[in-house]
Image (tube, rainbow, N blue to C red):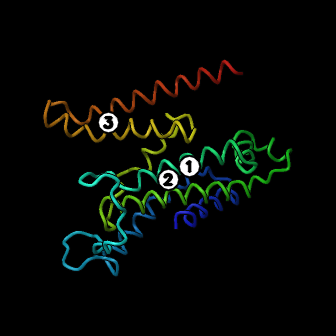
Amino acid sequence: GGAGWASIGAGIRVARGVNEVLVTLLMNFIALLIVAELLHGRLGEEGAGFPQSPLFEGNAWLPKLVPGTDLHLGIAIALLAALAGYYLLWHTTLGFRWRVAGASEPAARYAGISPGRTVFGLMASAGALAGLAGAIECLGVHYRLIEGFSAGFGFNAVAVALMGGLNPIFVVPSALFFGFLETGALAMQRQVGVPSSLVLVIQGLTMVFVLSGLGRAGGQKV
């Protein structure tokens, strides 16, 4: 499902030349409304009082890695996906084509790489990973589909990817950093009295410093 949805954005990018980041960000709102419509209708649980699906069957839940904790199999799947992404991008011909096309479309055309095919392949793969992440959240945390369950994870993912230098391996500690900040925000406010909004400030400052460093490094290379 994620691959199919992202392919729509890829088609708009190839056919009309619209930036894929802008297209997919706007398509998020359409997807949210479609899910909300389904949960208010046929997929919704009757009498729940909140738009959500009935609980999934127990055999569909992701097993816990450590009994009595929230650590489930999805964490291992995420690590494997990061390793697979790194291997694909830096150790395969397909990954080399994707990196060339991302760095310079004219250079990709000169090398005989089809930018359109590259955009479709890369977007479909990214969409599939996003769909996998949503499935893990539903099957490993909520055990049902709930309206708005993602809580802006897609927007945070952009910051996580930039902080990780667009490298799948470095994205893992970057994601953990953001996750620890958001998880500890409410605890800080409850126990120490520090406003939870301070986490947003820390995240913003972190991104400013990271992007400034990347810009300076890029200028030195030029």
Q: Do the residues labelled 2 and 1 touch (CB within 8 Å)?
A: yes
On screen, residue 2 above or below 184: below
- Name the element at disc 1: helix
Q: Nearer the viewer, residue 43 or 140?
A: 140
Q: Which label's residue is closer to the chain start, 3 or 2?
A: 2
**Amino acid beneath label 3:** Leu
Residue designated by label 1: 21
**Amino acid beneath label 2:** Leu
On screen, residue 191 above or below 30: above
Which residue lies at the image location 70% right of the left edge and 60% below the top edge?
15
- Image coordinates for residue 49, horizontal then vertical, percent: 19, 71
Q: How far apart are marks 2 and 1 (CA)?
A: 6 Å
- Name the element at disc 3: helix
Q: Which of 79 and 56 is in front in this view?
A: 79
Which residue lies at the image location 76% right of the left edge and 48% below the top edge?
93
Crowding around mark 3 (Cα neighbors within 10 Å: few <14, some 14 to 19, many 20+) is some
- Image coordinates for residue 84, horizontal then vertical, percent: 59, 49
